[in-house]
């Protein structure tokens, strides 16, 4: 049973949805022998490598390795979870899964959310008509024309206009006549209660309107911008959060951009509505905006559902630089490769497009830098290299930045480049960087910057069977924490059911568990329980003061993450071998495991 849906119902939905017919609704397929082939919808290609088997009801791309059945196809192409995909596929064949996945209360809440979205959809059409066809929208039409927003952009982004009037209730009255209840208008954020007297009035008045759709293309909220130069109200207002809309779990233009992001393998992340629109006008269709709020974990995960790389394109000012630094950690935690788009000082994508045309934006995207290079260049550009104190401060900052890079080759390249630009000794700079890198690696439980290990400090728990040093040392760190806090032993038994791998680790843990179970302190009393070499290991463990992890939770998550990454590397090898031998069924199974493990890594919470 998946998602609460009985297995037999899942099978009935699967059998009712022929995979060739389903995929043909999204892309053009042509028969080639027993298979159907077409251009892959998940990556950009010119020669068809996407293969669909009618007999096995499977698809596989020999280019990007996407694979699965009707459920995985809909989940990936439309960005749905399993239950949502089952609901969509079920509706195609007349099967309703609601009773299996919802309680009566949940069903009631869903229907209310759907009612709110109906109101938003209706409001969007009202706003659009006001902008394009009504006399009241003339002033707003002049404004969008002056901003360089043409008819194509108006249509693509469904822009609208919220008029003002003496009664201030034009939209509210319109929606009420359409049968929408007061509660729906209030919870949608389209209307507000009057402070004096009874009744409701419009939340958006005399503003250019930006409809905000969820990842499925349903309008759930709106953003509004003032259009008059002397308007002293806040420049932007947004719909309040409610049953159908959460700022932290949505991105502006995601639904439209997701298909392009999937094909391009990347997404461009901007600050505002007009920035995303500017990229669209420049031909970069995979741009989204973070809805005027700091990037959240939920938004980072949303991006990771559609691509593996994100280009941050925030405003070229101090606030934008700070937001970039904060956003990188969240994006990398979601498993994304991060690059930074550098714009001229004081510019944003919209202003740059209007000043210099689309070519400058395209060039900025094509020239996106790694986050490391972005930090290095910001540090150098922000320093007065003619002033000794300023130069020294810049060098210290650069040492911290470069030393934090885990890749030795990249560190060496950056040291050579920076030493030349700052006219400092490359050897001296490399020494400082190596010390910083080694210190950071030790705090993470890893080897020194040059890859060497102190043989005196190196534990006999090191691999003899090819086990990585990082995994062995992390297991050792967990055992040290168990010795410090015996209560951690219970957490380990519950969360590391697969046990320990490094030589001696499992024996030490069992001995600790035995003492803890008997209510005894974990100290030298552990030695008589052990034999031979394991006694030496235990003694060394109890004497070691190094604590690379602050908590048992952190250590367990780190170990699980390392093991998952190792398994992902193994899967890559197996997939390449299976591809060479044409074993599509094996590839599909491996891809399913690969996707599940990547989702666990991306969520982090699933690790523990």
Image (cartoon, rainbow, N blue to C red):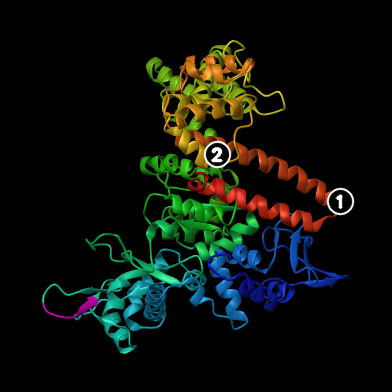
Q: Which secondary structure class fits the magenta region best? A: loop
Q: Residues in magenta?
A: 197-201
114 vs 458, left or right, is left
The local secondary structure at tag 1 comes to helix
Residue 517 against residue 55 in the figure, above or below: above
Tell me the crowding category of disc 2: few under 14, some 14 to 19, or many 20 or more residues within 10 angstroms, Cα based.
Answer: some
378 vs 7, left or right, is left
Q: Residue furthest top?
A: 456
Identify the mark nearer the N-term, 2 or 1: 2
Q: Residue furthest front?
A: 518
Q: Quote the CA–CA distance across marks 2 and 1.
A: 36 Å
Residue 405 against residue 320 in the figure, above or below: above
The foreground one among 167 and 513 is: 513
Residue labelled with disc 1: 581
Q: Which mark is residue 107?
A: none
Q: Residue furthest right?
A: 33
Point out residue 212 in the picture as x, y percentages from the top left corner.
Answer: 42, 67
Point out residue 354 in the picture as x, y percentages from the top left corner.
Answer: 46, 57
Residue 307 against residue 542 in the figure, above or below: below
Q: Which mark is residue 496?
A: 2
The foreground one among 401 and 495 is: 495
The local secondary structure at tag 2 comes to loop
Point out residue 158 in the picture as x, y percentages from the top left corner.
Answer: 46, 73
């Amino acid at each position: 049973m998946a998602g609460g849906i009985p297995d037999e119902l899942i099978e009935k939905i699967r059998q009712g949805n022929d995979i060739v017919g389903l995929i043909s609704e999204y892309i053009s397929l042509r028969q080639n022998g027993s298979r159907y082939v077409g251009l892959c919808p998940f990556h950009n290609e010119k020669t068809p490598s996407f293969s669909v088997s009618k007999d096995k009801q499977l698809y596989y791309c020999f280019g990007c390795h996407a694979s699965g059945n009707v459920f995985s196809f809909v989940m990936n192409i439309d960005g749905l979870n399993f239950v949502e995909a089952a609901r969509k596929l079920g509706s195609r064949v007349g099967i309703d899964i609601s009773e299996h996945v919802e309680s009566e209360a949940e069903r009631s809440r869903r229907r209310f959310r759907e009612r709110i979205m109906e109101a938003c959809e209706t409001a969007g059409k009202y706003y659009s008509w006001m902008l394009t066809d009504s006399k009241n929208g003339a002033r707003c039409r002049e404004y969008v024309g002056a901003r360089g927003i043409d008819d194509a952009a108006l249509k693509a982004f469904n822009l609208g206009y919220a008029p003002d009037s003496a009664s201030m209730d034009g939209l509210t009255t319109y929606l009420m006549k359409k049968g929408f209840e007061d509660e729906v208008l209030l919870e949608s954020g389209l209307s507000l209660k009057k402070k004096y007297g009874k009744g409701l009035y419009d939340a958006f008045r005399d503003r250019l309107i930006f409809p905000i759709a969820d990842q499925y293309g349903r309008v759930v909220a709106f953003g509004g911008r003032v259009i008059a130069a002397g308007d002293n109200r806040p420049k932007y207002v947004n719909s309040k959060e409610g049953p159908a809309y959460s700022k932290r779990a949505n991105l502006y233009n995601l639904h439209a951009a997701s298909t392009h992001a999937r094909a391009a393998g990347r997404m461009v992340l901007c600050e505002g509505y007009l920035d995303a629109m500017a990229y669209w006008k420049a031909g970069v269709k995979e741009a989204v905006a973070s809805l005027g709020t700091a990037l959240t974990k939920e938004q980072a995960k949303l991006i990771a559902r559609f691509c593996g790389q994100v280009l941050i394109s925030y405003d070229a000012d101090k606030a934008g630089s700070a937001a970039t630094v904060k956003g990188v950690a969240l994006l990398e935690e979601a498993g994304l490769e991060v690059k930074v788009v550098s714009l001229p000082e004081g510019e944003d994508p919209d202003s740059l497009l209007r000043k210099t045309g689309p070519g400058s934006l395209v060039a900025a995207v094509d020239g996106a830098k790694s986050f490391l290079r972005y930090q290095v260049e910001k540090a150098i550009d922000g320093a007065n290299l003619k002033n000794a104190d300023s130069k020294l401060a810049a060098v210290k900052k650069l040492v911290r930045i470069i030393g934090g890079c885990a890749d030795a080759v990249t560190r060496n390249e950056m040291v050579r480049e920076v030493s030349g630009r700052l006219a400092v000794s490359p050897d001296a700079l490399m020494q400082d960087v190596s010390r910083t890198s080694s210190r950071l690696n030790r705090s993470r439980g890893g080897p020194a910057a040059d890859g060497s290990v102190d043989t005196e400090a190196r534990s006999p728990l090191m691999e003899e069977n090819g086990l990585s040093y990082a995994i062995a040392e992390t297991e050792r760190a967990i055992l040290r924490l168990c010795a410090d806090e015996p209560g951690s032993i219970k957490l380990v038994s519950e969360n590391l059911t697969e046990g320990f791998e490094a030589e001696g680790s499992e024996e030490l843990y069992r001995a600790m568990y035995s003492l803890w179970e008997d209510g005894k302190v974990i100290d030298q009393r552990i030695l008589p329980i052990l034999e031979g070499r394991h006694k030496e290991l235990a003694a060394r463990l109890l004497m070691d003061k190094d604590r690379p992890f602050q908590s048992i939770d952190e250590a367990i998550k780190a170990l699980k993450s390392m093991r998952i990454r190792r398994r992902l590397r193994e899967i890559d090898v197996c997939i390449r071998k299976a591809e060479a031998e044409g074993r599509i069924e094996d590839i599909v199974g491996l891809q399913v495991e690969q996707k599940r493990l990547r989702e666990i890594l991306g969520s982090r919470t699933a690790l523990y």
